[in-house]
Image (cartoon, rainbow, N blue to C red):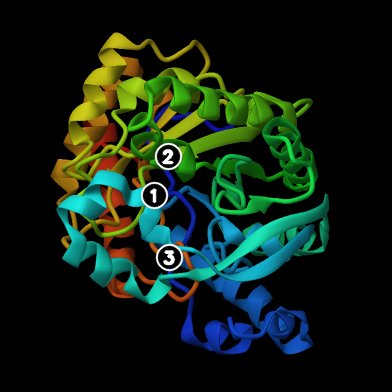
Amino acid sequence: MERSTDRILTTHVGSIVRPEALLALANPQDEAARDTEAYAAALHEAVAAVVSKQVAAGIDIVNDGEYGKSSWANYVLERIQGFQVREGQFDPRDWLGRERERFPELVQAEFGQYIKRPAQACVAAIEYDTTAVKRDARNLNDALAGSGATAGFLTAVAPASAAFNAVDDYYHNEHDYVMAMAEALRKEYLEVYRSGLILQVDDAVLANMYDHLVQRSPKDYRKWAELRIEALVYALRDIPPEHIRYHVCFGSWHLPHTVDAPLEEIVDLILQVPSQAYSVEAANPRHEHEWRVWERVKLPAGKILIPGVITHHTVMVEHPQVIADRIVRFARIVGRENVIAGADCGFAQQETIARVHPKVMWAKFEALAAGARLASAQLWGRAAA
């Protein structure tokens, strides 16, 4: 993985607001629409365009915008076998815990359209079909050729975040179910690695389950989380750490986030994952103070921190100097060569959701690059290329 050896490199978390033309062909109401030649051609063209736009905005380590996925996590249900849909079984508000109790009207406004969503039940052995991930890797590698990007990455869901609301009616054992999911996801991870791209593993649910479970007992959360970290480590076996980055966030929804997991309570779990880089939220007002955690917790030798220095939580475009200040703060704690400037989370966690207007998103990316240039000039004592 590239390091910030002579300037601060830039990247982001992955999901980018999809173009309307691609959404029209994808048709989220009809999964078969993704199997058409027209969709495949449009996807290939859209990935090439979004890579070009990322490079033009000043992003060094780019991806496909997650254009080939319907969502950041549940896309995997379109690629694995062994699950069936059960109507009206899952209410996403149930695991918002104390925030649902404190802000019921806001939670209803944010999640009301998803009440009693269909949920999945595992009813057979979990098997993974690599067709789509191979397509995504080809599309991104084609787009990277001659683009000027420093490197490319593809995202994949972690075992803790894959079908996290599903019911196990097959394995009848939590450990066996989680490890079976990990073994299936391993096929996806290996395809990304073999393609030459960086693998980013996304794991929002690791943090999101914290408040829900610690209300019963902190031990309940640790037991739940440790099993899923064990599963992820198992799934990543034989993939060199320098090909892996691990992203943990606290949920993209626009709620107050008053009961998010403190980073200091989960950082030891994060650092158990055998990746070279760790991507964490650090720009929004609920988590910006957590840079202090890295004063107390030493970043292991050879590792890279990707702090969010822009956020999806607000339409306000961060000033480049604010971004530079955030970068410099981290660089002075963990070393400038160990920092890559990133984002808190993605901007379209589901293909039909845009957390900010696309023009605002691109303005944030441009501000990220401008801030990285300012930080580089300060950290290296010269103007950065």
Q: Is residue 219 left or right of residue 238?
A: left
The disc placed on residue 87 is: none
Q: Residue 152: give x, y in percent of width and height.
A: 60, 49
Estimate how packed mark 2 is, as few (under 14), some (14 to 19) or many (20 or more) residues with alpha carbons within 10 Å.
Answer: many
**Position of the N terminus by quadrant:** top right
Which circle's residue, 1 or 3, is located before the other in the chain? 1
Which circle's residue, 1 or 2, is located before the other in the chain? 1
Q: Is residue 297 left or right of residue 72?
A: left
Of residues 142 and 343, which is closer to you in this image? 343
Image marks 1 and 2: residues in contact by CB distance under 8 Å: yes
Q: Residue 133: give x, y in percent of width and height.
A: 74, 58
Estimate how packed mark 1 is, as few (under 14), some (14 to 19) or many (20 or more) residues with alpha carbons within 10 Å.
Answer: some
User: Residues under labels 3 and 2: Cα distance?
Assistant: 21 Å
Q: Which residue is mark 2?
A: 209
Residue 128 position (above or below residue 33): above
The disc placed on residue 348 is: 3
**Residue type, numbered disc 3:** Ala
Q: Is residue 314 left or right of residue 23?
A: left
Q: Tag 2, which secondary structure?
A: helix
**Residue type, numbered disc 1:** Trp
**Residue type, numbered disc 2:** Met
Of residues 157 and 132, which is closer to you in this image? 157
The disc placed on residue 95 is: 1
Residue at the image point whose x is 58% and y is 81% from the top: 28
